[in-house]
Amino acid sequence: MARFDYFVLFAEMRTGSNFLEANIDLYPDLACLGEVFNPHFLAYPDTQELLGFSQADRDANPMALVEKIREQDGIQGFRFFHDHHGAILDDIIADPRCAKIVLTRNPVESYVSWKIAQATGQWKLTNATHHKASQAEFDRDEFEQHLGNLQAFQIELLNSLQKSGQTAFYVAYEDIQDVEIMNGLAAFLGSETRLEGLSKKLKKQNPAPMSEKVANFEEMEASLASLDRFDLTRTPNFEPRRGAVIPTYVAAAEAPLLYMPMRSGPVAQVKEWLSGFGGLEENFTQKTLRQWKRGHKGHRTFTVVRHPVPRAYEAFQRHIVGTGKGAYLEIRKTLSKVYNVPLQLDGPDETWGYEEQRAAFLAFLAFLKMNLDGQTAVRVDAVWASQNAILSGFADFALPDAVVREENMAAELTMLCEMVGVEAPGLPPIALDEIPLTDIYDEEVEAAVRDVYQRDYMAFGYGPYANYAASSVAS
C-alpha cells in the first residue's frame, strides 16, 4: 500500500517552486497542480476549472477539492504559500496520508528576486535571450514584514508536524537542480521512477551576485548588519555537480605519479611530459586505480590549473570556432542561431582575422556566463566548466596531492619528482594557435572572462591575465 495519497509543497514566492513543480511533473506517477488554493486564482492565473471545480466551487468547499485530488491516479499535489486559503491548513497538516514537502530559500534572496520580478513583470524565464534586467530597491520595513511572515509560517508548520508526529521532506533552493535529490523526493512520495536528468525548460532569472542586483546594496548591508547568516556577498553557483572522471586519469609507467587532467588545460603537454617516465598507463577504472595506488607506495597525484582567460580561449579554439576534429558541431550551430555568436558556417576562411576572432570570442564568453549560471539548455561541458567545480568533483574519489599552476609548472612538477625520488624530464613545447590569445586580449576580454569565472579567480588567487602572459607557457 502506498504511504501517501497526495502531497502538498509548502513554499513561497521566488523560492524555486515553479522549477521544483516542473521536475515533479517529469515523473509519470506524480503531478503537481500548481497553486490550487491561491486566493486570487485557481492553480494558475489562466485556469478556469480544475478537476471539475471552478474558483467559486473551491472557495465554497475547499476540502472537497482536496478530496478530489486525493482520488486521482498516482500521487498528485499542489503548492501552498503562507497567504493561501488557510481553511484547509489544519486538516492537511494533520492528515498523515498527505506528504509534506518544504522548500526553503535564503529570505534575502527570495525578497530581492520578488522585487525584481515586480519591476520587470517577468515571473518565469524559459529562454535566457528574453531575460529582462532590473535592480531591486531594498526597503527595510518591507523586508522585515516579509521575513516575519515567512518565519511565522515556518514555525507554525514545524510545530504542527512535531505535535502530530510527522516529518516533512525538506529541500533547499540550492538543491533543486540535483537529480539525485529529486529522485530521493520521488522515492519519499512513493514513485518507482528515477530520472537521469532534470527539466531544461525554466532558466535562472537573476544569477548575478547580490551586490549587482540591489540598487542600494550598501544600505541593505547596513540594515542587515546583525544578520550575518545571509552571506550577502557570495557569488551564486548554479553549475551542476561534477564527478571524478577516472578514465581520463593518466599515470607514469615507471614513476609513482598520477595526473588528473582538467580539460582545456595543458593536457597534451603534461601527458607528453609524463610519458618521459617509460610511457603511460591510461583507461583506469575505480578498481584498477585503487590497485595502482596500492602498488605505488608514496605516490603523488596532481592536477594542473590554468588561468581562466587562456583556458576559455582554448575551449573556444578547439571546440567552437572551427569545424575540424574536436569541434562541437551541434553546439556551434546553436551558439550561432540562438546566442548570436558570429561564427562562419563551415569554419574560418581567408576573411577571418583578429577582429572576427575577438568578436566571436567575446560573444562566446557571454554565452558561457549564461551557461554556467544555468540559463541555457546547452550542457555545461567539461571543456569550459569551472576548474573549481572540476576540482570538487575529484573529491568524489580522491583529491589530488598537488594543484599545480600552469605558469609555474616546470618548477612545481620538478618538486613533485623530488618528493618521489625521480629525475624530472624537461617540459615539451606546445603548439601555438594560428591567432594567438595575446593578439586579441585586452581589458574587455579580461573583464568578460572574470565575469564568467569569478569563482576560479577567487579559488585559485588569479589576477589579470596580463600579469601572467609573459611567463605563461600558454599562448
Image (spheres, rainbow, N blue to C red):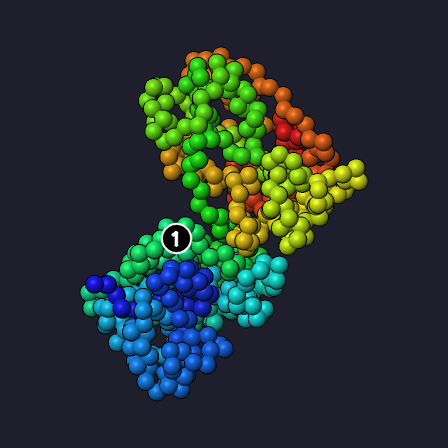
Q: Is 352 or 124 nearer to us in this picture?
A: 352
The x, y position of residue 461, in whole percent, is 54, 37
Location of the C terminus by quadrant is top right
The x, y position of residue 44, in whole percent, is 46, 74
Q: Is residue 467 left or right of residue 56?
A: right
**Amino acid identity at mark 1:** Leu
The x, y position of residue 182, in whole percent, is 37, 55
**Residue 87 sits in quarter:** bottom left
Which residue shows up at 36% across the image and 22% down it? 292
Q: Can residue 309 be seen in this snapshot?
A: no
- Above/below status of 356 relative to 113: above
Which residue shows up at 44% across the image and 62% down it? 22
Q: Is 173 or 296 nearer to us in this picture?
A: 296
Which residue shows up at 36% across the image and 58% down it? 171
- Above/below status of 254 relative to 104: above
Q: According to the image, label 1 marks what residue?
A: 195
Which residue shows up at 54% across the image and 24% down it? 270
Task: Name the element at disc 1.
Answer: loop
